[in-house]
Amino acid sequence: MIRFEQALRVIEKSVSPLTAEEIPLEKALNRILAQEVVSDADMPPFDKASMDGFACRRSDLGNELTVIEEIPAGKVPVNPIAPGQCARIMTGAMVPEGADFILMKEHAELTDSKRIRCIRHVESANICYKGEDVKTGDTLLRPGIKLMPAHLAILAASGFVRLMVTKMPEVAVISTGDELVEPADQPGAGKIRNSNGLQLTAQAGQLGLSADYLGIVPDNRQKLLEAVSDAFSRYHVILITGGVSVGDYDFIPDILRELEVDILFHGMKVKPGRHLLLGRKENHFITGLPGNPVSAFVLFEIVLKPLLGRLMGSKEQPQVLHVPLAETYSRSNQEMLFFIPVSLMGDGTALPLEYHGSAHIHAYSAANGIMEVPVGVKEIRKGELVHVRLI
Ligand code: AMP
Ligand code: MG
C-alpha cells in the first residue's frame, strides 16, 4: 500500500500529456490550452470614452464650451478639439484629438442648443487609455490553463479564433458485479442498482469529458478479460468499478497481469478507497475502483482528476480551502488518511456530515466539499483549520 502523496507522484511520473490539436474558439470552453497566447494589438486599441458626456480639455472646465461634433461608438472623430470646444461623445467612442477629459453628461448643463457648461466635475478623466488593459506583445494566457469564460473573452477580444489545446482523453466506464442491474430495472433478491456507472460518467462530464459507459460485466473471468482487453484498444483511460479487492470474484488484478498491464500500484492508505489499483499499458491507463459508490466517488475526485488533468496537459492544482471546522470531529482509527463529506456553511466553516462508511452515497448529496483528516489525527476541534476540496 502506498501513501496518497506517493500515488500522486506516480501519476505525475507515469502519465504524459496527449498531443495537441487545433480547434475553433467556440469549442474551447473547458479545454486545456496548449500554446502561449501573445497579443498582437493594444487593448483598448484607441483612447476610449468610458462615460457618455462631452470630450473637452480639462483646462477648459471653467468655461462655456461650444459643441462641435457628435461621436457615437464606432465612429472616427472628424475634428480636433480646440480651446473653448467640446464634442458630444458616447461610451466606447474614440476620444478626439485635443481632448483629455470626458465631462459626464450628468455634470453638464446646456446653456443653449450648442453650448454647455460644467456644473460639477470629478478627478477622473473618464478615459480608458490605449493599451491600458493589454499592450502589444503581452502574454495573455499560458499553456496548461483550463479555458473558462473570461479566457474566451480575452481570446475573442484579441482575435484568436483558432487555438491549440491538448486532445481530450477517450474515457470508458465499466461496472462489474453479478449483483448489479441497470437503474431502470427492478432489482431482484440479492441485487442492487448500478449507481457507479452514471456517477463516474457524470464526474468525467464535469471535466468536459464525454465518457462512454460500456455497461455491466458479470463477475466472470473470461467476460471481464474480453471487456478490458477491448477497452484498452479503444480508450486512453478505463474506469472500472468492483472486483479489485481480495474476494474470490475479484478478478481484475489477475486479468491485468494476463494482459501485460503494468500495475503501478494496488492499494493506497486512504479511507474510503484503499483497494484502488492503477495500471498502465503505454500511455493507456486503467483504474480499478472499489465498487462502493463513495469510494469510487472520492477516488475520482482525489486521484482521477489529477490523472485525467495530466493527460489533458493541465497545470491546475485542486482547489483546496483552509476553513474552520463547524463541529468537533473525532474518529477511532488514526492510521489512514480519511476523506469526509462536508458542507461549507454560510459563515465560512465546514460542517462534517453524518456518514456511515463507503456505501453511504446519500451522505454526499448534501456535500459540497471533501475534508482531509490526516494520518495520526484522532480529533479535530471546532474552529481548527481543515483542508477542504471543493466538489
Ligand atoms: P466490490 O468492490 O466489487 O467488492 O463491491 C463493493 C460493494 O460495492 C458491494 O456492496 C457492491 O454490491 C457495491 N457495488 C459494486 N459495484 C457497484 C455499482 N456499480 N453501483 C453500486 N454499488 C456497487
Ligand atoms: Mg464485486
Image: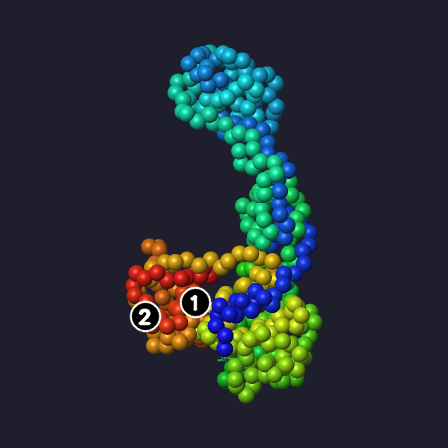
Counting other residues with Cα less than 10 Å from the Cα at mark 2, is it few (<14), some (14-19), or many (20 or more)? Answer: few
| Residue 224 sits in quarter | bottom right
Residue drawn at point x = 42 percent, y = 74 percent: 336
* Residue type at the position of mark 2: Glu
**SS state under label 2:** strand
Query: Is 228 on the left or on the right of 388, as rendered?
Result: right
Q: Residue placed farthest to the bottom in the image?
A: 248
Image location of residue 111, percent across then percent down: 44, 12
Depth check, front residue: 117 or 290: 290
- 381 relative to 291, above or below: above
Counting other residues with Cα less than 10 Å from the Cα at mark 1, is it few (<14), some (14-19), or many (20 or more)? Answer: many
Task: Identify the residue under disc 1.
Answer: 364
Depth check, front residue: 277 or 54: 277
Image location of residue 209, percent across then percent down: 60, 61
Depth check, front residue: 257 or 169: 257
Residue 45: tell me if it is visible: yes
Query: Is 327 on the left or on the right of 121, as rendered?
Result: left
Task: Identify the residue under disc 2.
Answer: 379
